[in-house]
């Protein structure tokens, strides 16, 4: 059997092991097949795994149990002994009744007396379908720094009221452990099916745990949740959303007091609490209406909106430029919220700036079925089809779209041929960075200590723009929470408190200002419109022309992303094996280009292949591999944090678009030999 064990008190995060009963022996001793640590001390944990492979479980436990590491009360070997004992118990259970854990989990749900009728009916439909039962009940959704995300259906491997309650009990335990019940928590939700239901279930659990709860009266953008958390001085925040995923999905984002998503240590605490909490009997809850009457749940709305909008509009660089472009240049844009949470506040901000805009009427109503699009993702040209019809009719050069929880922003622009094309998150971010620096230099508001922040998988064009303009640039790990952490560090350092200029990631997320700690499509929509108005009014340029000028000025940088899905119950194992294989034996050459250095962020090491020198990577540990090629191109590979897929980023340094495309294709072909 395969057994997964989440460790506590060590640098390793998880242990996966395989054991089986030796049927050739009368005592039925269990034999260890494979052991794999996630995290840990590299060679040490690999050595331990190699040592115990093939050993009897009882013998290994005797050797490992009680070993400590430094001042810690435990160690990776000690945690492995606990994992082996639990795995042996689980195997005994399987051998006793021959019933796999997923069948036991299914039966537990079916036999729970408090199960709601809808879930009972759904479970009855899959009775006898072992593949479906296995899919729904094989393992619980993993709670990480990004919270939870999964398909809405019954089971522990799904999003439903029971997994939401269990996760919220874990959050409640963390808040109580930190003695922050009175600070409370704020809850928001998007337009997805069941989002409001899940949000209210979370509120009931927190209230039953005597934690003060604030909940929005209707759907809101994710960044407003981040803002509200800080504005209300709450301990934590919960947002029910699956961002831009298909309609079958929903998710649970968890935030801490700084307004950013949970840091790894708190996420681990919540995950441990979830694992120890019975999904039915271990969760406290209460009646929603009664909790509202008693003041334990407070409904919020308009006041927060006003403060949030005020902070967003303070990030404008040229507040009057939009009115100027509208008056003198007939400047007008098209906006669509793609049936999501941007439907209200973004048009409100546009109106307050004086922008002339039209909305895509068929996509303005919040609807979790997203009836006009296959995927509500603003990076896809297909979602702009209705907007393009409006733009042609209204003679607009720019269409802005935001995703269902209004944290990501995509645009379509008219090119020289009169056709509408999408620009990538890297391109839009580079244009915004160039605009902010240029405009702030002009109006003399660029700070001498100005600093931009980007993720390691975001275009190197940003670094070039900053370098040429005397602006500092900082790289962080993938995920906007790491940009949020940098903003927090700037605020805590009095000499750098006002230095944050702009942060962005390639996945269409942007932020200026310190009012929030997450990417903000409300802010980004306003600033993109302002940027387009600036270039239209002052330079008589479209955004396609602006992008072309940036390439002429700084050189051509192309980007491509390859997503390789690993479905099925063994998908996670395949992904781990691929990452570990490349980690142990990294390529020295890709598509004819020598690799100069190799960064393994999991071991926090950079190896220079020319000299053999090893130096620290300088960022927190993460399952990311980064290759620096001799021509300046970068290749980055990591498993997705929210979906069963491996993502490969190609950050190409090239002569032009054609050269970039050729490089990307040859690199993809080369990488296919490692990732398959």
Image (cartoon, helix red, strand yellow):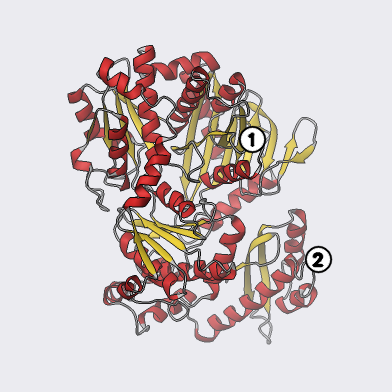
Residue wearing tag 1: 627
- Mark 2 and mark 1 residues within 8 Å of each other at the beta carbon: no
Percent from the top left, x then y, of residue 303? 35, 51
Q: Is residue 550 above or below residue 451?
A: above
Q: Nearer the viewer, residue 126 or 528?
A: 528
Provide the secondary structure element on which disc 1 rests: strand
Q: Is residue 84 above or below residue 142?
A: below
The residue at the far right in this view is 70
Please report the residue visible at 40 percent of the width from the left and 45 percent of the height from the top.
308
Percent from the top left, x then y, of residue 512? 49, 36
Between marks 2 and 1, how big is the CA–CA gap? Answer: 36 Å
- Which is closer to the viewer, label 2 or label 1? 2
Please report the residue visible at 71 percent of the width from the left and 63 percent of the height from the top.
10
Q: Nearer the viewer, residue 88 or 221?
A: 221
Residue wearing tag 2: 71
Q: Earlier in the sequence, mark 2 or mark 1?
A: 2
The label number, if any, that marks residue 222 in the structure image: none
């Amino acid at each position: 059997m395969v057994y997964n064990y989440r460790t506590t008190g060590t640098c390793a995060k998880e242990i996966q092991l395989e054991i089986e009963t030796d049927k050739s022996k009368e005592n039925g001793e269990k034999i260890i097949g494979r052991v794999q640590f996630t995290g840990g001390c590299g060679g040490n944990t690999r050595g331990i795994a190699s040592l115990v492979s093939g050993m009897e479980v009882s013998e290994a436990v005797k050797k490992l149990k009680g070993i400590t590491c430094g001042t810690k009360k435990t160690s990776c070997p000690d945690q492995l002994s606990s994992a082996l004992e639990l795995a042996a118990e689980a195997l005994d259970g399987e051998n006793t009744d021959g019933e796999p854990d997923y069948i036991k989990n299914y039966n537990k749900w079916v036999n729970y007396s408090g199960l709601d009728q809808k879930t009972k009916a759904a479970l009855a439909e899959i009775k006898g379908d072992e593949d479906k039962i296995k899919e729904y009940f094989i393992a619980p959704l993993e709670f990480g720094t990004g919270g939870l995300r999964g398909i809405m259906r019954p089971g522990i491997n799904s999003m439903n009221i029971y997994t939401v309650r269990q996760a919220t009990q874990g959050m409640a335990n963390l808040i109580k452990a930190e003695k922050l019940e009175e600070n409370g928590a704020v809850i928001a939700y998007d337009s997805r099916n069941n989002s409001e239901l899940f949000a209210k279930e979370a509120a009931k659990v927190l209230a039953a745990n005597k934690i003060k709860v604030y909940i929005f009266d209707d759907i809101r953008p994710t960044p407003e949740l981040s803002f509200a958390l800080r504005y209300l001085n709450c301990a934590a925040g919960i947002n029910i959303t699956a961002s831009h995923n298909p309609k079958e999905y929903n998710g649970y984002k968890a935030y801490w007091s700084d307004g950013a998503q949970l840091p790894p240590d708190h996420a681990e605490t919540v995950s441990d609490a979830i694992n120890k909490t019975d999904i039915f009997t271990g969760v406290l809850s209460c009646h929603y209406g009664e909790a509202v009457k008693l003041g334990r749940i407070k409904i919020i709305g308009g006041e927060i909106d006003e403060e949030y909008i005020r902070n967003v509009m303070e990030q404008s660089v040229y507040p009057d430029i939009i009115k100027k472009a509208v008056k003198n240049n007939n400047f007008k844009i098209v906006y669509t919220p793609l049936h999501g949470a941007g439907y209200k506040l973004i048009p409100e901000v546009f109106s307050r700036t004086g922008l002339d805009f039209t909305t895509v009427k068929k996509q303005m109503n919040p609807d979790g079925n997203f009836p006009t699009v296959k995927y509500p993702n603003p990076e896809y040209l297909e979602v702009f089809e209705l907007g393009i019809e409006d733009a042609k009719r209204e003679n607009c050069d720019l269409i802005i779209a935001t995703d269902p929880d209004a944290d990501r922003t995509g645009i379509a622009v008219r090119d020289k041929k009169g056709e509408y094309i999408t620009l990538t998150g890297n391109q839009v971010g580079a244009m915004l960075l160039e605009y902010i620096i240029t405009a702030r230099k002009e109006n003399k508001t660029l700070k001498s200590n100005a600093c931009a922040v980007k993720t390691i998988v975001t275009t190197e064009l940003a670094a070039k723009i900053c370098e040429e303009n005397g602006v500092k640039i900082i790289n962080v790990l993938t995920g906007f929470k790491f940009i949020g952490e940098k903003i927090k560090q700037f605020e805590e350092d009095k000499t750098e408190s006002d230095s944050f200029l702009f942060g962005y990631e390639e996945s269409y997320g942007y932020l200026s200002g310190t009012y929030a700690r997450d990417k903000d499509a409300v802010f980004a929509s306003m600033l993109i419109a302002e940027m387009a108005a600036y270039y239209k009014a002052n330079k008589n340029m479209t955004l396609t022309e602006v992008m072309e000028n940036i390439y002429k000025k700084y050189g051509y940088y192309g980007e491509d992303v390859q997503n390789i899905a690993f479905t099925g119950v063994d998908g996670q194992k395949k992904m781990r094996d691929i990452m570990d294989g490349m980690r142990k034996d990294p390529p020295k050459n890709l598509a004819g280009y020598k690799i100069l250095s190799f960064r393994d962020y999991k071991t926090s090491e950079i190896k220079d292949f020319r000299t053999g020198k090893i130096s620290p990577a300088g960022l927190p540990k993460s399952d990311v591999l980064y290759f620096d090629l001799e021509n300046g191109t970068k290749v980055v590979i990591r498993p997705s944090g929210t979906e069963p897929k491996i993502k490969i980023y190609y950050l190409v340094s090239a002569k032009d678009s054609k050269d970039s495309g050729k490089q990307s294709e040859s690199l993809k072909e080369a990488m296919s030999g490692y990732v398959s």
